[in-house]
Image: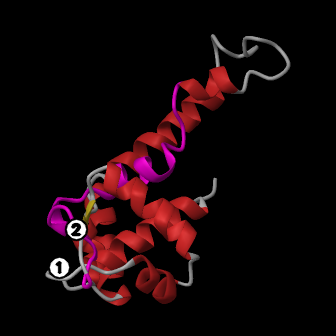
Amino acid sequence: MKITAQEEYGLRILLRIARHDQNEGISIPAISESEGISTAYVAKLTRILRIAGYINSTPGYKGGYVLARPAVEVNINQVMKVLGGALFSKEFCQDYPGALKLCTNSVDCSIRSLWQMIQLTVDQLLDRVTLQDLISPEQESSALLESILHQHA
């Protein structure tokens, strides 16, 4: 399993916007420079985040992007699904049946059970993480995420 570039960069962009002064937006060129991502890719990802309702654009000379809602209300699991989708969905078995039109394991599949359990575990964990939890410096965020993980176990 891999985290896609779109998920990684999209989350980094959202975090950069969350850390910026919410009274004035942060521009695409400023995000691009600070994150080391091309302006075209930043524009693509900010569009996805704006359409999903996570950020708003502000007009004018000091314009740019700001959060559309408080960071504490932004669920990381939902953000990740907007940026890249779930790790596993029921459609997966229909999309990858092999050479046949129907997967040979469509009725009895222990692998599907594994993927569903992994997805459930990831969902349960990420549903407890908000953008606010990630705004702190890494050491603080790491401790907070560890406490969330231990509460989950």
Does the segment drawn in magenta span residue 67? yes
Q: Secondary structure at mark 1?
A: loop
Image position, residue 105 (x, y; %): 71, 16
Q: Which residue is mark 1?
A: 22
**Of the residues shown, which amino acid type is indicated by label 2?**
Leu
Q: Which residues are magenta?
A: 61-90
Is residue 138 or residue 109 the one in the foreground?
138
Could you classify mark 2 by the number of other residues whose Cα lies within 10 Å: few (under 14), some (14-19), or many (20 or more)? many
Residue at 54% over, 44% down: 87
Quarter of the figure with the C terminus: bottom left
> Residue at (17%, 59%) from the top-left corner?
73
What mark, if any, has residue 67 been given in the picture? 2
Answer yes or no: do the residues labelled 1 and 2 have beta carbons within 8 Å?
yes
Asked whether 120 falls inside the magenta stretch, the response is: no
| Amino acid type, callout 1 | Gln
- Tell me which numbered mark, 1 or 2, is placed earlier along the sequence: 1
